[in-house]
């Protein structure tokens, strides 16, 4: 389901005929928009009854047209080549970067899914016209909300409010939100923070694209398998018409695309209001059998020069403006090529075990002339023997560079393992060296150590000390959890060597032991020592306790 931004395709025999006719034309002409003509892909929509679930979008109508029957780029050209082509083949820079970043992220976290970014582009086209032609800010957040119809049961699902209006502004019913059109209840489950800003925002194309990718890859789906691909798309919006349209755009983008500036993407003709009302518009009236509905998209005969695809307002089809024309995407300049990445910032990456690193790894991508390269995916990876992790437990994340060429990794959570590890930043560009950031996890510390009681510690010769020894560690007045404590019997206040006689602990075999290491305080900063035993020697003995951070406590043990 998507915001109103162009001609409306409604479920039903008429619209299905249009989609099927377009697919047949594409297949017959072997145009780049062709999709397989198997029975499943070209079957009429009324042969598949929508399920009772609400999928990602609430299964509400969507608004788009079919792609043009023209080759996006020159035959054999790379899909990454920023060459001139059909206007519809242009994808706004931030939107394209978000799709590719999501593909790379899923390739790392769910490699068996085989998610192609062109599938996200196809769904993004159908759902929101690529975030309304890439009208997003530098962080990838839409300049204005993209809201679907009110899901009040009039023509689609009836979903009562689940987010108290937080995302869709409606406290009565839900509405799908953002460039990938998630209903709030689905976003609550699948929402992602892909740009590392600490928020899961359905209005952000990076967050929304990764969330859509994870949804499509749910379970054990392998999107290189046709049946799994179809299931994933139908899971997004359960309509055969929707499946056919998304597959058509998917194939179109696979045959070539190029990057255009944000805000200059092509929208379908006859744009509707930005914020749809609570009720759907009337269905278009079908024409005579074999014709096309009006005002829906028309389908030219195979091999014809016409295009059923989106056009700029007032035009008869997709156009490529002359150089310098600011009203359209024109011919984009080649994207700068990254030649090096360098560290930015001077902060030291250090954290106490169990805490969040306050500084974050960051790099800047530059071209050969030292100019920043924007929208370049940078992979940050935690390397080495450590249990430190990025948010969500990940060891690898991908972040796109901003307009200044900078990319900053999400915060890292230190684990309990102390020592050094590396945060490595790399780009998928040949001969560009990665950058390593050294990070250090230090042991938890305490600057205070005290007994929890003042009970005297005494025992008879050869007996057990009856009173337990319980301690509390603090750091800057607060309980210090997980602090390592060493407990050792010492000869005297000035001699820390272990005595050959006097009180002792026991090892696992029951043998005397006069030093214990790696004891740790609990969540409340408390530690109770193991039982202490007296030998036959009488007198006063000393037990010294020390923590990481310098806290020391000496306790008297009396045997009489």
Image: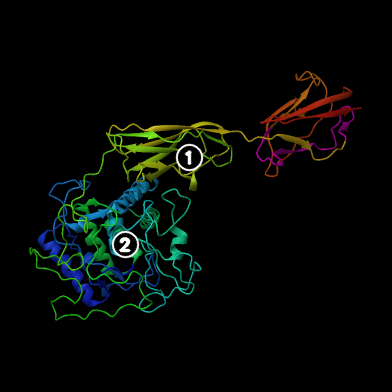
- Looking at the image, which residue is at 29% across and 54% down? 262
Instruction: Please report the residue visible at 24 percent of the width from the left and 71 percent of the height from the top.
Output: 7
What residue is disc 1 on? 360
Tell which residue pokes out farthest to the right in this image: 560
From the viewer's perspective, tell me whether residue 251 is left or right of residue 152: left
Is 29 magenta? The answer is no
Gap between marks 1 and 2, in whole Å? 37 Å
Q: Decide if residue 236 is in sight here.
A: yes
Check disc 1 and report its element: helix, strand or loop. Answer: loop
Quadrant into which the C terminus falls = top right
User: Magenta segment: does it hold 474?
Assistant: yes
- Decide: is 121 above or below 560: below
Q: In this view, does 172 lie to the left or right of 293?
A: right
Residue at image point 78% right, 36% down: 450
Based on the displayed image, in which of its 4 quarters is residue 309 positioned? bottom left
Q: Name the quadrant containing residue 19.
A: bottom left
């Amino acid at each position: 389901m998507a915001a109103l931004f162009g001609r409306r395709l409604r479920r039903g025999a008429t619209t299905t005929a249009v989609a099927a006719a377009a697919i047949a034309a594409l297949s017959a002409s072997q145009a780049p928009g062709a999709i397989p003509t198997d029975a499943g892909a070209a079957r009429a929509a009324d042969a598949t009854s929508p399920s009772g679930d609400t999928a990602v979008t609430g299964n509400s109508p969507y608004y788009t047209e079919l792609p043009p029957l023209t080759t996006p780029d020159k035959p054999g050209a790379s899909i990454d080549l920023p060459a001139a082509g059909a206007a519809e083949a242009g994808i706004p820079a931030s939107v394209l970067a978000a799709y590719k970043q999501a593909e790379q992220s899923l390739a790392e976290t769910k490699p068996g899914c085989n998610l192609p970014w062109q599938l996200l582009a196809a769904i993004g086209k159908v759902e929101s016209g690529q975030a309304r032609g890439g009208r997003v800010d530098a962080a990838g957040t839409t300049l204005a909300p993209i809201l679907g119809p009110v899901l009040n049961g009039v023509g689609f699902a009836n979903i009562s409010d689940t987010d108290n209006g937080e995302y869709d502004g409606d406290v009565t019913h839900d509405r799908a939100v953002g460039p990938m059109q998630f209903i709030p209840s689905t976003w609550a489950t699948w929402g992602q923070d892909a740009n590392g800003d600490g928020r899961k925002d359905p209005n952000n194309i990076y967050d929304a694209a990764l969330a859509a990718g994870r949804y499509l890859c749910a379970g054990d789906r392998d999107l290189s398998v046709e049946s799994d691909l179809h299931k994933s798309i139908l899971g997004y919006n359960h309509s055969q018409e929707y499946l056919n349209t998304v597959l058509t755009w998917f194939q179109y983008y696979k045959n070539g695309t190029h990057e255009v500036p944000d805000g200059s993407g092509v929208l379908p003709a006859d744009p509707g209001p930005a914020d749809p009302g609570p009720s759907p518009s009337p269905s278009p009236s079908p024409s005579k059998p074999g014709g096309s509905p009006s005002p829906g998209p028309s389908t030219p005969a195979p091999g014809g020069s016409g295009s059923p695809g989106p056009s700029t307002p007032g035009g008869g089809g997709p156009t490529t403006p002359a150089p310098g024309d600011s009203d359209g995407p024109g011919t984009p300049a080649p994207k700068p090529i990254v030649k090096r990445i360098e560290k930015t910032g001077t902060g030291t990456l250090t954290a106490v075990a169990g805490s969040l690193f306050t500084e974050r790894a960051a790099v800047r991508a530059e071209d050969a002339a030292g100019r920043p390269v924007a929208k370049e995916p940078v992979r940050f990876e935690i390397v080495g023997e450590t249990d430190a992790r990025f948010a969500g437990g990940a060891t690898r994340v991908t972040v796109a560079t901003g307009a200044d060429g900078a990319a900053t990794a999400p915060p890292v959570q230190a684990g309990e393992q102390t020592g050094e590890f590396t945060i490595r930043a790399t780009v998928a560009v040949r001969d560009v060296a990665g950058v390593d950031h050294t990070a250090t996890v230090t042991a938890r510390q305490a600057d205070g150590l005290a007994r929890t009681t003042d009970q005297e510690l005494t025992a008879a010769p050869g007996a057990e000390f009856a009173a337990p020894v319980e301690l509390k560690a603090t750091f800057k007045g607060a309980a210090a959890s997980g602090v390592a404590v060493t407990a050792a019997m010492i000869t005297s206040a000035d001699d820390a060597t272990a005595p050959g006689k006097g009180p002792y602990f026991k090892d696992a075999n029951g043998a005397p032991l006069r030093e214990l290491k790696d004891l740790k305080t609990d969540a409340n900063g408390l530690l109770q020592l193991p039982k202490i035993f007296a030998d036959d020697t009488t007198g006063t003995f000393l037990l010294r306790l020390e923590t990481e951070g310098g806290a020391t406590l000496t306790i008297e043990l009396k045997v009489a």
